[in-house]
Image (cartoon, rainbow, N blue to C red):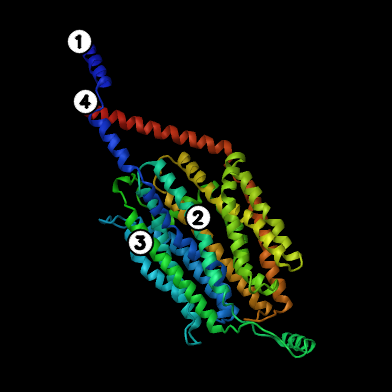
């Protein structure tokens, strides 16, 4: 018996003192293999730019393009915008469902989706900004290519988002790559606004004077002694060509980013984690919406994003029609996006210093006074630039902070459901679903409201009802929706104490799993 005990002690001592020959070298090689170079991270990050660039161009300019350049009736424009965004919302969880069941290829599981969808997505995007030479089928044309582009872009962006889990099995490396990605995506919003805005801004659609405008021009001509100087004449065809040039530049950037992503990133099959058994589409909805904190966060994000998307979708039209800045609205939009980009590091610091919930309240409420000021003050270009820059700081918080809270909800779900794993993609895909649904509703309702108010396509002046409607859409309605969202946020249960507690519990679970795996490996080696 003593001999047996001594033999066991000897065995343990030799196990502890044994040189790290095979296991240590294997672990070191595995760690080295999972490390990502700066080049790999940059190539991965570049893949996030197309979604943001095209999203900004469509969000800011598609409504005014359909109304003033394609010259569609506001009612039909509202149908295109609503159906297109609603269709886009439906495709997110659907494509996620299909991607999760796609087989592994020699290029990986995600990259084939990205590569195969890119050429068709680029073609569909370009044709959105092309005015067909017929009138009867215009609505079908724009609706078809808008929906097709949204579907193909989803086939790019959903696999790209999931690609994070397949570029490395090291959490630290994935977090670092994600930080690179967020930086490039923020820059993508600025690039999209700058390219579309500056190219189109050089050839704004000429307005059509109404009776009052003609009388004002006649009086001005008489007072000036019959001389009425005017700048170079810009035809509608020039504006249409400018939109096509801008879309062509964006298409080239889209393809370039996809090429860089494909050749600069490699999927790693061993990065896959064991997952629970696959569930049905509606089972996934029941799973994620059944988690209380997630449902509350989704409602908060739904109302606040609906408010900000009303502002985004109508601000260009508000600047050009109500404020009278037809030749400057693209610069005003660029100021907002630049301000939002510069403000992101500040809000990152703020949420770590004061907590995420406080940061959401502070950041979202900070934009409300400027929403009110922009419609109450008399039209002044300098004041509008100042207000837009200040508003951009709040816009950055409104879009950044809810996304930073989503991982906390996923952690909370994992703590309460330790046996249900591998469902993180469901939380993200349905989060995007509600975001895009809010976008579709906001664009559809706002364009339909302009139709009821009597909006005149390319009109140099608009009826008073249109001015009032635009003020409501960029100020009163967003403010009300933001306040509703913040009231719901009050009942959001995950505060800093609970968040830190969840993180500690998950860390202990991972350490226990690692210890268990190490013990099993040692036993196998001893046997």
Classify 58 as above or below 371: below
Residue sticking out furthest to the top = 2
- Quadrant of the image occupied by residue 439: bottom right
Asked if the residue at tag 1 contacts the one at tag 2, i.e. Cβ–Cβ closer than 8 Å, the answer is no
Give the class, few, some or many, for how many residues have Cα within 10 Å of label 2's Cα (few <14, many ≥20): many
**Residue position for label 4:** 526
List x then y, in percent, for residue 461. 70, 80
List x then y, in percent, for residue 51. 46, 62
Residue 3 numbered mark, or none: 1
Label 1: element kind:
helix
Label 4: element kind:
helix
**Residue position for label 2:** 431
**Residue position for label 3:** 259
**Label 1, label 4: how far apart the Cα atoms are:** 18 Å
Label 3: element kind:
helix
Of marks 2 and 1, which one's residue comes earlier in the chain?
1
Of marks 1 and 4, which one's residue comes earlier in the chain?
1
């Amino acid at each position: 018996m003593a001999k047996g005990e001594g033999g066991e002690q000897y065995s343990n001592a030799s196990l502890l003192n044994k040189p790290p020959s095979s296991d240590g070298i294997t672990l070191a090689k595995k760690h080295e293999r999972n490390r990502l170079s700066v080049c790999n991270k940059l190539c991965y990050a570049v893949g996030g730019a197309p979604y943001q660039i095209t999203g900004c161009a469509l969000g800011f300019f598609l409504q005014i393009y359909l109304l003033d350049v394609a010259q569609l009736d506001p009612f039909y424009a509202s149908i295109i915008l609503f159906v297109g965004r609603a269709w886009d919302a439906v495709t997110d969880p659907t494509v996620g469902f299909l991607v999760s069941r796609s087989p592994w290829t020699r290029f990986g599981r995600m990259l084939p989706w990205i590569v195969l969808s890119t050429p068709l997505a680029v073609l569909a995007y370009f044709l959105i900004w092309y005015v067909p030479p017929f009138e009867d089928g215009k609505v079908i044309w724009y609706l078809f290519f808008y929906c097709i582009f949204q579907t193909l872009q989803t086939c790019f962006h959903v696999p790209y988002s999931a690609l994070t889990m397949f570029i490395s099995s090291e959490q630290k490396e994935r977090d670092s790559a994600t930080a690179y990605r967020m930086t490039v995506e923020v820059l993508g919003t600025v690039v999209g606004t700058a390219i579309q805005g500056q190219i189109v801004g050089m050839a704004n659609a000429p307005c059509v004077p109404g009776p009052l405008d003609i009388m004002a021009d006649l009086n001005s001509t008489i007072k000036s002694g019959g001389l009425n100087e005017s700048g170079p004449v810009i035809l509608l065809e020039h504006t249409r060509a400018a939109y096509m040039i801008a879309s062509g530049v964006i298409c080239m950037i889209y393809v370039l980013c996809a090429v860089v992503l494909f050749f600069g990133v490699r999927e790693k099959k061993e990065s896959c984690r064991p997952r629970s058994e696959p569930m049905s589409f509606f089972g996934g909805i029941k799973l994620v919406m059944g988690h209380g904190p997630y449902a509350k966060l989704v409602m908060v994000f739904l109302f606040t994003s609906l408010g900000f998307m009303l502002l985004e979708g109508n601000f260009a039209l508000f600047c050009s029609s109500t404020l009278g800045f037809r030749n400057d609205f693209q610069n005003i939009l660029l100021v907002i996006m630049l301000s939002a980009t510069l403000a992101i590091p500040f809000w990152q610091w703020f949420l770590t210093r004061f907590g995420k919930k406080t940061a959401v309240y502070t950041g979202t409420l900070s934009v409300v006074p400027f929403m009110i000021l922009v419609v109450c003050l008399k039209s002044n270009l300098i004041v509008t630039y100042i207000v837009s820059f200040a508003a951009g700081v709040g816009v950055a918080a409104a879009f950044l902070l809810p996304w930073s809270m989503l991982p906390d909800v996923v952690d909370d779900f994992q703590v309460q459901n330790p046996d249900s794993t591998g469902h993180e993609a469901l939380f993200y895909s349905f989060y995007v679903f509600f975001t895009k649904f809010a976008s579709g509703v906001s664009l559809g309702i706002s364009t339909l409201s302009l139709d009821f108010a009597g909006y005149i396509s390319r009109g140099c002046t608009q009826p008073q009802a249109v001015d009032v409607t635009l003020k409501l859409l960029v100020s009163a309605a967003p403010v009300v929706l933001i306040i509703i969202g913040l009231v719901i946020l009050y009942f959001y249960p995950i505060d800093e104490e609970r968040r830190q507690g969840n993180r500690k519990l998950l860390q202990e679970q991972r350490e226990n799993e690692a210890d268990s795996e190490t013990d099993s490996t040692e036993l196998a080696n001893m046997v």
